[in-house]
Image (cartoon, rainbow, N blue to C red):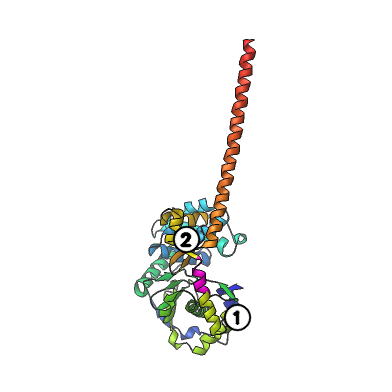
Amino acid sequence: MASVTQRIRAIQQPYGGYLKPSEFKIIEYNDNNTLAEENIHSSLVGLAVDYMTRYVMGSPLEEAFKISLIGAKLIDELEEATELLNNIDGLNSKSVFYACKLVGYDVCYRAGPMGYKPVDDIEADDDTINNIIIMVKRSIEFFNEYGPIILDGFTFEGGYTKIITTGDGDFLTKDTLWDFKVSSKKPTSVHTLQLLAYYIMGSHSIHKEFDDIEKLGIFNPRLNCVYLKDIKDIPKETIEEVSKEVIGYNNDSDDLEASNSADDEMSNYLSMEDIMNVFECSKYRIMKYYSEDNLPLQKINNKYYANKTDLYNWLQEKINEKKEEEEEKKAFLQIVISIIIIAIIIIMIIVKFFKW
């Protein structure tokens, strides 16, 4: 079992790759800005650009930085992460400075707490902050031209196999599947194969939006370049080979099984409206549970759902926690009452003693 990226990196591709980067159409933009040298890791810069772009484009802060908040929760630093989040307000130097710190929690979710390094040590300098602001602005310009976004941060329910069991894509616009890269280098065959795998898995998944996808695209705000490939120009044999040898689809019966599995899987999910009815509260409160208490929500077709079993287990866990808290309060109250009774008895004894 592997993620999409793990599987792609383990594959020995044909010479030049299954999908040659040189076959992508390149569109270069020039905003007359030159990026300076940065003083924090490029992965943090990439995450900050990604999440700040989502936020500036209209996503709620808690949604844009949800992976960071979940990562912080895993190491019991949600309060610290929330404080960092509260310092993000618009696209400015202060917001970007704290965003760089906040994304340092992502590693706890993506790779595990063992890879975590204190976010207090992440101190983006002025050049790094300015670079991020430039790249976010470039991303906004990109979406103004190629958008709007119809799906983001999506997974591939119904499209996973025994070989690839996890993975998520970046963005879908009306006719294009997009991947964001903030590398200083041009796309490689690893990047293009990953994008092709996303398209094939998306086509097998429950996401009907993939029916309208005609192009594969990569946008790199660091290079300020767009790379595009028409899917109709990809040989059918290449798609079939990647489907079978890389992803693990074998035949039509497997496709049917995956489709039926997707339908069965969705029957086990509650919609946001259902969840709100269960909790008898607003969507805002549900999202607060999601970011602060690890409520098990999943984003499907750009909407949030909860697996019935996962939700039941989460609720049971919260009920047990509440019972424990109540028992602790009772025990504490009993101790207080006992102390008061003992104090009263002692006072009565003392008073009686002095009367004698």
> Does residue 126 appear anywhere in the picture?
no
As drawn, the label of residue 11 is 1
Give 171 or 322, whichever is nearer the viewer.
Answer: 322
**Left-right relation of 245 to 146:** right
> Element at badge 2?
loop
Residue at label 2? 65
x, y percent for residue 290: 49, 57
Quarter occupied by residue 6: bottom right
Please give the name of the residue rendered at 50% of the width and 77% of the height, measured from the top-left corner: 259
Tell me residue 232's x, y (percent): 43, 87
User: Does 148 appear above or below 102?
Assistant: below
Closer-to-camera residue (168/183): 168
Magenta-colored segment: predominant secondary structure: helix
Query: For the magenta stretch, what is the residue range?
Result: 261-268
Quote the CA–CA distance across marks 1 and 2: 31 Å
Instruction: Sort mark 2 into few (<14), some (14-19) or many (20+) by Cα contacts within 10 Å.
Output: many
Identified by mark 1, the residue type is Ile
What's the residue type where badge 2 is placed? Phe
User: x, y percentage for residue 311?
Assistant: 52, 59
Residue 8 position in % (x across, y down): 57, 78
